[in-house]
Amino acid sequence: MRAPRLTEREAVARLAASGEAVLFYVDPADGRGRVLRRGGDGGLVLIAP
């Protein structure tokens, strides 16, 4: 399975729609992986290199 190529805005929308806790994706601007997850307070946390 390949990671989806998404902008940060697209990743936020996909995570919100999915109901999942974590989304791994590749930023098309630099080709590097990112992790977007739900924080304990319900907000989103972006983990990026």
Image (tube, rainbow, N blue to C red):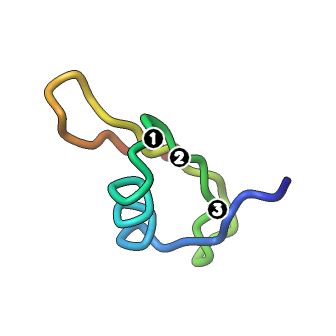
Is disc 2 in contact with disc 1, using a CB cutoff of under 8 Å?
yes
Q: Is residue 38 left or right of residue 36?
A: left
Position of residue 29 measured from the top left corner of the image (x, y, whole percent) = 58, 77
Q: Amino acid at mark 2?
A: Leu
In front of the other: 44 or 28 = 44
Q: CA distance from mark 1 to mark 3?
A: 17 Å
Q: Which residue is mark 3?
A: 26
Query: Is tag 1's residue or tag 3's residue first in the polypeptide sequence?
Result: 1
Q: Amino acid at mark 1?
A: Glu
| Residue density around tag 3, few if under 14, some if 14–19, many if 20 or more, within 10 Å | some
| Residue density around tag 2, few if under 14, some if 14–19, many if 20 or more, within 10 Å | some
Q: CA distance from mark 2 to mark 3?
A: 10 Å
Position of residue 43 measured from the top left corner of the image (x, y, whole percent) = 19, 39
Q: Amino acid at mark 3?
A: Val
- The label on residue 23 is 2
Is disc 1 in contact with disc 3, using a CB cutoff of under 8 Å?
no
Q: Which residue is mark 1?
A: 20
Give the label, 2 or 1, closer to the camera: 1
- The label on residue 40 is none
Q: CA distance from mark 2 to mark 1?
A: 7 Å
Give the label, 2 or 3, closer to the camera: 2
Is disc 2 in contact with disc 3, using a CB cutoff of under 8 Å?
no
What is the secondary structure assignment of the residue under circle 3? strand
